[in-house]
Amino acid sequence: MLHHTDCPVLVIPEKSAFPTNNILTCDGKGASIYAIKQFAYLFPELASQPTTLVYANPETNHQIPGHDSIMELIRCHYPKLNEVHLDANGKKFFNTWVSEIRNPIVVAGAFNRGDISMIFKKSFMTDTITSHRLPVFIAHK
Amino acid sequence: MQKILIAINGEELNEQALNFACAIAQIKASPLTGIFLENLVENEQLIWKVTGGGNYPEWEIDERSKALATKAKKITANIEKFRAICQANQVACKVHEDKSVPVREMETESRFADLLILDACMSFKGYTGTPSDLVQQILRHAECPVIIAPESYTAINEIIFMYDGSKNAAYAIKQFAYLFPELYDKRVIVFRIAEDGIWQGPEREQMLEWLQQRYSAIGFEVQKGDVKDKMFDYLLKRENNIIVMGSYGRTALSRFFTHSDADFVINTIPRPLFISHI
């Protein structure tokens, strides 16, 4: 169903509390930025909550390209913003770190079917989403 | 607050387009970022490099050339003018100077922006039509919605959604509503061409249901006949509105703009046009 919807989708686990923290996932590519924008347009009320931008550059340990421009855009919508840069080892600690965040919602982007299955099967968020049973907002074009 | 951009040919500032962009920034209570484009690649010329190992030719910018100095002066003057106009309109402003290939620069800038405002005639090669070749290319690659600035602008009292039943048209309508919740009290008209001039059924009801969540004055204008003729007749009679259109996807956009309704609107109807594509 996710593949065929023409609007963003909110995947909610059976038991979850109303989100009070946002986790934005970003790899600097168009799909993730698109999702971050759509979440802010649809939920301006939630965007004003404490937000953590997690950026992971799977290919290198360097900062994502266009970092300053990304921050300029995201700060317009998410005033209470924190940044976390995940390097290759960060993946291990990410799961523990998320468990300390109260009632989070994850924002993820996808441009095609492959990307959607990646969110649930192969990405650095996979363990976190499945083990903590977090709500996920997915926007895809 | 949102990140609103206006693309400007560094050497030629269109004041009408800038005043319109300021009006949009005022509606959104947001700052305006001027992207000053400069096609430096065009200034590259073949230069003989002299080195110990021998001489060789290389494409480079001649930093000492008069043409480059004149160009730089013009750009500095236009940046000053941009700041002055924004200040006169009480809009906070920022400047980005992009010196590489304009289309590529705009693709990246638009990815990290909420809205891009364009002057339909912007070009680095003299007049290349309305919309210009450059504007068509930017539209094809833009990663955020675009508004084509009108030649003259007074106010937005009405929103006209051009709906052709396509996924793209619906997408553009949604993006417009998300970006401009401030315009919730304006009159909304959904314009559609139907074969027999009648549009009924669940699709119309679903659209009305969605619109009712966001707007209170909603009308449907359904006509039959040639799309361009009807659109022209209808749009020209109405004033102080913004037209919202989708397009047929990135790969087909050039085709769309050669034969399209959006091209026709940009060329013939002096109204702001909001375009967003999947």
Image (cartoon, coloured by chain):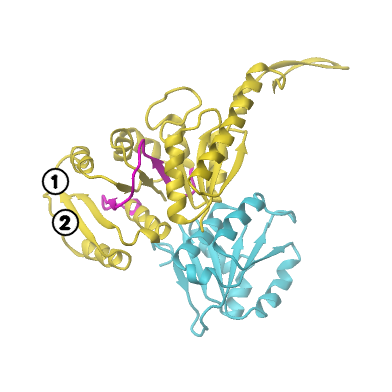
Chain colours: A cyan, B yellow
Q: Is residue A14 left or right of residue B240?
A: right
Q: Nearer the viewer, residue A119 or B166?
A: B166
The image shows residue A118 at horizontal and vertical percentages of: 56, 63
Q: How many marks?
A: 2
Q: Eyeballing the image, is B77 above or below A96?
A: above
Q: Residue at x 67, y 80 (%)?
A: A100
Q: Residue at x 44, y 68 (%)?
A: A9
Q: Chain of mark 1?
A: B
Q: Which residue is mark 2?
A: B199
Q: Residue furthest front?
A: B88
Q: Which mark is residue B224?
A: 1
Q: CA distance from mark 2 to mark 1?
A: 10 Å
Q: Quadrant of residue A123?
A: bottom right
Q: Chain of mark 2?
A: B
Q: Which residues are magenta?
A: B142-168
Mark 2 crowd level (few <14, some 14–19, many ≥20, 10 Å Cα): some
